Image: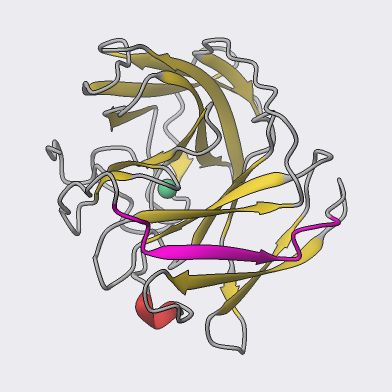
Amino acid sequence: MKTHAKHVFFAIVCTALALSACTPKAKPKAAAKDEKPIARLTLLPHESIQPGRPTTVIAKLTHNKGLYALNDNDLENVHTSTFHLLVIDPTFSDYQHIHPRPTETPGLYSFQFTPKMAGGYRAWADITPKETGQQTYASADLGTPGGLKINKADTREASVGGYRFTLSFDNAPTSGSESMGKITVADMSGNPVKSLEPVMGTYGHIVGFYDDFRTVMHVHPMGDEPGSESDRGGPELSFHMEPTKPGFVKLFAQVKIGGKELFVPFGVNVVKD
Ligand SMILES: [Cu+2]
């Protein structure tokens, strides 16, 4: 994978196939297709989650070969956290980005989870083990997710929190090809918004979930990252995408404006090369 700018990274990984990942810090080689993810994720409890009810969940990352629990000393701090958890329901409507915190027991993390939807969720641990320096994902379920019910409409515009977000690409997203995406932020009158606040060390987290319910991607905007909490970004967030497979991708941009975090949903159909 080519690196186009200092602050770009892009990764698509599924639970069975570690496909590729690159970060500004570490430029890894593409993983072999049959290479197993380095870590396994376990979530307890995985039953009895209920809409609107906060549940404390214990998360454990286990090294796949060594079978020992990974803790903060084994993980790189990436965008202000060693452990990002990306959680979504099978309708792809309730996406949550959670940072599990270490407990007093080494190797065990905990977090509060409040589902909006009934039924189960799937969660991906987004981690960078020091052993490899490569971003990797490991997934587990919370409850028992039902069948997928995804609205696969191509959606390039969204209004969230009193702002308008528009997504565009220089080339139609195609499997195996690079395309540059751009998210433009405006207020409801159409004025450009230049007051994007840092959220976990960047002006935006762009996370995509494929309709196979296995493959996720996590991209950050190109250009300078915020150097301090008072820095501001926008009105455009440009990012680099290189989808490894065709299919529908539900894309969420996580941004912060006026002290509020916003999750902006888009739908993108990646066509076959
Ligand atoms: Cu991110």
Q: Residue at the far front: name it.
A: 34
- Give how far across and how far down residue 59 sits, in percent: 61, 69
Q: Is residue 122 above or below residue 69?
A: above
Q: Nearer the viewer, residue 102 or 243?
A: 243
- Give how far across and how far down residue 219 sits, in percent: 36, 40
Q: Is residue 148 left or right of residue 64?
A: right
Q: Is residue 264 left or right of residue 29?
A: right
Q: In which quarter of the image is the N terminus?
A: top left
Q: Which residue is drawn at 59% across and 50% down?
A: 123
Q: Is residue 1 magenta?
A: no
Q: Quadrant of the C terminus?
A: top left
Q: In this view, does 266 lie to the left or right of 46?
A: left
Q: Residue at x 37, y 50 (%)?
A: 231
Q: Which of 22 and 142 is in front in this view?
A: 142
Q: Give the range drawn in magenta.
A: 35-48
- Give how far across and how far down residue 226 sits, in percent: 33, 51
Q: Is residue 213 above or below residue 72?
A: above
Q: Which of 101 and 226 is in front in this view?
A: 101
- Give how far across and how far down residue 116 sits, in percent: 80, 41
Q: Which residue is drawn at 65% across and 21% down?
A: 150
Q: Residue at x 57, y 29 (%)?
A: 264
Q: Is residue 243 above or below residue 156?
A: below
Numbered label tally: 0
Quarter of the rendering containing residue 14: top left
